[in-house]
Image: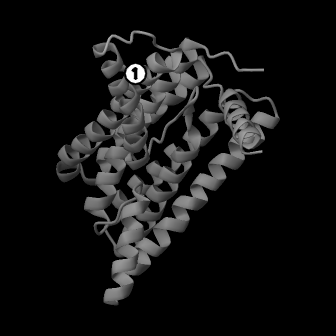
Amino acid sequence: MPLRRNPRTASIKLTVAVLLTIVAGQVDVAGFVICWKTFTAHMTGNTVHLAMSVVARHWTDAVKAGLVIPIFLFGSLIGRCLIEFAVRRRFKRAASLVLLLEAAALSEAVGFTVVSHSTAALWTSLMLLALGMGLQTATLTRIGPLTVHTTFVTGMLNSLAQRLSIVLFLLWDKFRGRTNTSPADSHALRQAGMLTLVWIAYFFGGVLGALLVTPFQMRSLFFSLMLLFAAIVVDQLSPLSIEEEQDQAKQESEEHLRRAG
């Protein structure tokens, strides 16, 4: 039986997605500037840096990228396990649990660099930022049928291109006098708008990070912590329906298997 999509739920999820994407943009910039030009959310870039460092035998740089990637993966794994556990226990505010852990990781990262500017403190902060971004990646992955990523935008741009292609053909059909449109066409236009908004949020977070990191260093992440707590408040007032998004993913997977069979 198809899932009924609640427009209010979609709007709430989009709001939280925008808040989290701003956080990711700022954290990625802060980590890159302060922690030896290492990304804490952009694992594609770290994978390339790892490969280049190994070939060039820059072992210190290789270790940075080589540690950040599994820490990010570990954070994402912990986040998904917590959400799955909460869903099985019928706990609707699963997202708050993961976001609180992320806030704790970011707070500790700030604390380590405020107390000490030692190399050990920077290494610890780098790992904590990567852990926080991994946790965030697991928190919100879908808005109805639309897959979203709040810590990286490459996949989002690819999804945006797919929706824009549908919109372009819709405009072409209207130009040719073929006015018959399906609900999927209007959904594609709406989803293209959502994806564009999320990309703009990531860009805005990066700009914010660049403006704040020089005068405030890691303390600049207090702004990201404010946004995280805002997202937690939203989830407390109106749960993000993580169970609904898991059901949607399961339904689409079953549909894919049915077509393949």
Q: Secondary structure at mark 1?
A: helix
Q: Residue at the spot x=51%, y=20% of the render?
A: 184
- Rendering coords of residue 176 (x, y %): 30, 15
- Rendering coords of residue 234 (x, y %): 53, 22
For the C terminus, the quadrant is: top right
Check disc 1 and give the amino acid type.
Answer: Leu
For the N terminus, the quadrant is: top right
Answer yes or no: is residue 59 visible: no
Viewer-proximal residue, 224 or 117? 224
- Rendering coords of residue 174 (x, y %): 33, 13
Viewer-proximal residue, 25 or 148? 148
On screen, residue 175 versus residue 169, left or right, reads left
Which residue corresponds to mark 1? 189
How packed mark 1 is, by other alpha carbons closer than 10 Å (few <14, some 14-19, many 20 or more), is some
On screen, residue 216 versus residue 98, left or right, reads left
- Rendering coords of residue 138 (x, y %): 58, 45
Q: Going by the picture, which residue comes out furthest to the bottom?
A: 57
For residue 83, which quarter of the picture? top right
Q: Going by the picture, which residue comes out furthest to the right?
A: 89
Vertical placement of residue 223 versus 151, above or below: above
Viewer-proximal residue, 149 or 74? 149
Vertical placement of residue 212 versus 246, above or below: below
- Report the label total: 1
Answer yes or no: is residue 10 visible: yes
